[in-house]
Each structure stands twice: as C-alpha cells, then as structure tokens.
Amino acid sequence: MTVPIDFWFSIGSPYTFLAVMRLPEVAEKAGVEVRWRPFDARAVQLDANDVPFADKPLKAAYMWRDIERRAAKFGLPMRLPIPYPLPELEQANRVAVLAADEGWCPAYAIATYRRWFVDRDPAGSEPNLSSSIREAGQDPARVLKQANSGAVADALDAATREAKEIGIFGSPSFVADGELFWGHDRLEDAIEWQHNLDQGNPG
Amino acid sequence: MTVPIDFWFSIGSPYTFLAVMRLPEVAEKAGVEVRWRPFDARAVQLDANDVPFADKPLKAAYMWRDIERRAAKFGLPMRLPIPYPLPELEQANRVAVLAADEGWCPAYAIATYRRWFVDRDPAGSEPNLSSSIREAGQDPARVLKQANSGAVADALDAATREAKEIGIFGSPSFVADGELFWGHDRLEDAIEWQHNLDQGNPG
C-alpha cells in the first residue's frame, strides 16, 4: 500500500515545465504514486508579496538561461523566447483542475507545456488549449464548458487556499507525508522521501 | 592549462554554507581550479529590491528545513536554530577579501561557517572571528587590523560592484567562462561546465 505524493503546480510557472515533463518518469521508476494538484501560484505569491521574477530583470534573464541549460541536460526540447507571462493562466489551470478530477491531468499538462515551450503557443489560450485537451483524449467543447462553470472555479480557489494553508509559496512544490519540497530541483528528493516511507524507512 | 571558475559568495548567506563546505572537494575531484570571490550579497539584493527571505516567514521557515535536509544528505553537521541574520557580516566578508588576496580564504570560510552552523557562534563576531582566522593559520591581531583598513573595505566594495556588473544577484554564484550559475544547487553544473571547457568540449 503506497500513499501518493502531492504535486502542487500552476501552469504558467516557467520552472514547472521541467517538473511536469520529468515527474511521471521519475515517479514511475521509484514506484511512487503522484496526485496532481493544480493551484493558482500567482494568487499565493501576490498574497505573500513575493512575486519572484517581476521587476527583477537580471533574475528573470538568468531564469530563462537556467531553464534552457537544465532542459538541455534532461534532453527536453524548448525554443526561447516564449510568450510570458501567460495572458490566460487561470483558464489553463481551471482545465487542469477538471483534468485532475477526471484523471487526465498529466497528459494535458505535458501537452500544453510542450506547445508553450516548443511551439510558442501560450498555454490557456487557443490554439494550445483545445489541442492539448484533444491530445489528452477529451472533447474540447465539453471540457471548456465544464471548466468555466462555477464549480471548477470554486475547486481551483479551494485548492489554492489549501496550498496556502500547508505553507506552499510557489510552483512546483511536492508534499510527501507532510514534508514540503519546493522547486523542480527537489523533485528527486521528494520522490526519494516518499519511496523511503513506502519501504518503511524513516525519511 | 586550466582557467579557474569564480566562486562568488557572501558569508552571511545560509545556503552558501552548503557551497562553502562542498566546493573544495567537488572541484578537486573534477580537477577544476576555483577563485574565491567574496562580495556583499546583501548590498546587491537591497539595490535590486530583492531580499529573498526577509518579510517572507513561510519561505524562511522552508529555507532552514531545506538546508537541514540537504546538509543531512551531504553528511554535513549543523544544529538549528542558529543566529540569523549576522550582526557583523561586513566584518566577516572583509576578512574573507583579505584571505582571498593572501590565499587562505577556503580554510577561513569553512572554519567560520562551521562555527556558525555547528557551534552557533555568529560569523563575523567574536569568538568565531578570531578562532577561524587562527584555524586558517593566521594571526588574528594582524588580520583584523588589516581587514579594517580602508584598502580592504574598498576591495570589498569593488568586488561587489564587479559582481553587480556581471549580473550576479545572490550568493552563492559560480561563473565559468562567463556562464553564470546561481545557487548551491548549481555547484555541480558549474564545475561540469568548466571541466568540459578544460577538456575542449563545448559546454
């Protein structure tokens, strides 16, 4: 019996690209189950007065170069510059919430990040949005209608409140048995933590 | 013929503990030479309106837990809580500038970080300061007199300006052939970059 790790993420976060693309394979190798938990990281950051890259041009320039180097290291294609910030990130994350509820979130997240980082089509906007929903095996008309219902918006708000309550301050974050790991750099550490718990070893 | 990597660091930065403690061994294994470049990261951050942990209690709490987990992973002893921020970090870094000029910077930086993180004595203040200078084989009276001269203060200011000019925004940072790497998490990547250059491979 294994307990899933929670993967808290927001589509729109550049570094989350690396985590979305790598997590499924790393988790599967370790035999760790993952629960995909979309939330609105921008709302959390505005709330905490901690928006990492806005008004910090040096750090933002570094971020893109760093992501590019890491992507090359992991063999992940990407083509800079890409549109940023996303004009419709809430739309992107509402669809993710519905996808998580229905079980097709990884396929959607991977597809939409690839279209954003390789084809330079912003996630959350057309044509990326419908193409990525379709790639995940779903009907865009049905999904978009449902994703724009009050129930899904409420679910995104509730997830964002839950993230704040457990001390999450950015995307991507991982929670393994209450232990918080922040940043794609901690992906392996989080998986290892959960793997050790599953084996009955203290973390 | 190898070109040294520049290790830009400020005593006072918590994450820099991990880099100071691990860099000498990682660099030696890779056959990469390191130039220790103390600067005043706080001045750079205040200038850029980017002080990472002040007024961000959630992130600060996470930082300590993260450093503790990483230190355990690397087998580095530390005992939380430790005094933070340092009341005399400029003193700590003036001594580092003199030490770098005279060739005993790694021994001093390692000694003062160990006293701060294990014995809980703040770096830059007594008894940490004189004990760490002595541990690096130097006479504290001579060093402190010289470190408090205008020439050393000017050298620290000049180093800080140079850091800003090449786009450094935090400690620790590494520069290998003009390529900037930020954070102790990039230590291995920076060393590998330089190592590949030394071997004649493009990074």
Image (cartoon, coloured by chain):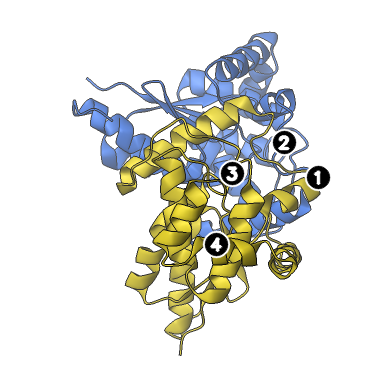
Chain colours: A yellow, B blue
Q: Quadrant of residue A73?
A: top left
Q: Position of residue A49 (x, y in %)?
A: 78, 43
**In the image, what residue type sits under mark 2?**
Val
User: Which residue is at a point 70% across and 47% down the rendered structure image?
Assistant: B121
Q: Nearer the viewer, mark 1 or mark 3?
A: 1
Q: Nearer the viewer, mark 4 or mark 3?
A: 4
Choose the circle earlier in sequence order: 1 or 3: 1
User: Are discs 4 and 3 both within one chain?
Assistant: no
Image spot of residue A149 (x, y percent): 70, 66
State the separation of the CA atoms marked 4 and 3: 59 Å
Which residue is tagged 1?
Answer: B55
Q: Residues within 10 Å of mark 3 (few under 14, many from 20)?
A: many
Q: Quadrant of residue B171?
A: top right
Q: Residue furthest left?
A: B200
Label drawn at residue A141: 4
Return the residue at label 2: B51
Q: From what the image shows, is residue A173 above or below residue B160? A: below
The amino acid pointed to by label 3 is Tyr
Q: Which residue is mark 3?
A: B113
**SS state under label 4:** helix
| Distance CA(mark 3)–CA(mark 2) | 21 Å
Asked whether the residues under marks 3 and 2 belong to the same chain, the reply is: yes
Q: Are marks 1 and 2 in contact (CB under 8 Å)?
A: yes
Is A154 placed above or below A115 here?
Answer: below
Side (left or right) of A125 relative to A137: right
